[in-house]
Image (cartoon, helix red, strand yellow):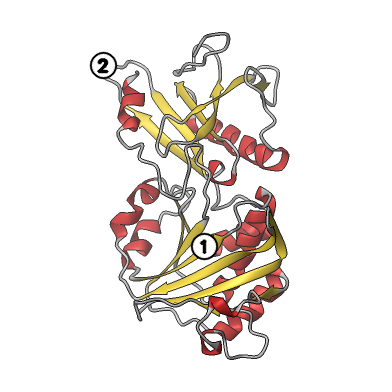
Amino acid sequence: MTELEDRFEEDGNEQEEQDDSGFARVYMVELLYKSKPELSREALYAKMEAYTGQVDVPDDDEDAEDEDDKADVPGLAVWEAEDPDPSNDTLMFFHLNYKVAYEEGELPAQTCVFQTNEETKPEKYETALQQAWDWPEARETVEACRYSVLLTDFCAAGLPYKERLELFQNALRALLEVTPCDALYWSASDNIVDPEQYQSALAEGQTLYGAMNVRFYNVQGRGAERREFLMDTTGLAALGLPDLQCHFYDMEPGEVASVLGDLGYYLYNRGDVIQDGETVGWTEQQRWRCEHQYALAAPRRYVLDLDPGEPYYAGRQHHGENR
């Protein structure tokens, strides 16, 4: 095991909502606020229906002890979950345009909005803040936040990954318009982003902004004479695709980041179609060999490892070997 692999293995604890591949059974984003947010159920319902299509509650009174547990606005398709903690408010939306097939039949995918009065702790976001290259004010902003609202999906893991992300992004759009926040934390990609930048990026067609994070590690080996780096993505594995990684010497990080970002969008648009041993690149000189592996850097997940060739590659691939 290399020094790099040993270093990252120590941090390889998996999140409970993810399996060994990194797939997220529950997808979530946390909205952070400097001031306590005010959330209108009626306004949020209207935005949800505008951006995600028809929403409803299940036709089953067993989901609530009485009719008072359901929203008292006619047609308001929001179910308020019971919670023993009175400081928590939970709203659940059932999206009839997004159905998931089960053996017993189809069920609508759901999104849930959790409000809490529990104060946020900046140290929770430390690993994300260390990689917040696109937002210089991220740390200052997050340290000033004291409140949060959590948006999750539920019973949505069976959707095709593009539909799942589309539904989630539209629900997030609705929530941001009703109660704008100061920072967004994407749990699956461990990514802190500026809400205004996020909304602008989505309007420009950057579908994976926030959902995919490109990370950079400067590896300081003992007595090393060469510059050694690791770059990877997080967030794709949570959707059921492989993330990407490249362990390399002496190349410009910006060049590698560009390759990872472009290839991340390629996998999102085309699916996991690149086979082990195939090469990718945009010129005859740039042909990087690919292999599916487990990630060197936590969290544990599937990645497509990229070998840029000699003398740059600092990792190992196993083509033709018994693993």
In this rendering, is residue 248 above or below 171? above
Tell me the amino acid under the disc marked 2: Gly
Residue 223 badge: 2
In the image, which is nearer the foreground, mark 1 or mark 2? 1
Label 2: state its secondary structure.
loop
Q: Measuring 37% from the left and 17% from the top, which residue is drawn there?
A: 226
Q: Where's residue 70, x and y in %?
A: 56, 84
In this rendering, is residue 157 above or below 222? below
Tell me the amino acid under the disc marked 1: Thr
Quadrant that contains the N terminus: top left
Q: Nearer the viewer, residue 181 or 273?
A: 273
Q: How many marks?
A: 2
Estimate how packed mark 2 is, as few (under 14), some (14 to 19) or many (20 or more) residues with alpha carbons within 10 Å: few
Q: Measuring 39% from the left and 34% from the top, which residue is drawn there?
A: 217
User: How far is mark 1 from mark 2, CA to CA?
Assistant: 46 Å
Q: Where's residue 188, x and y in %?
A: 49, 50
- Residue sitting farthest toward the left: 222
Q: Nearer the viewer, residue 113 or 253?
A: 113
Task: List the residue tagged with mark 1.
Answer: 152
Q: Where's residue 229, x and y in %?
A: 41, 27
Q: Is residue 76 left or right of residue 184?
A: right
Q: Is residue 217 left or right of residue 79?
A: left
Q: Where's residue 32, x and y in %?
A: 42, 67
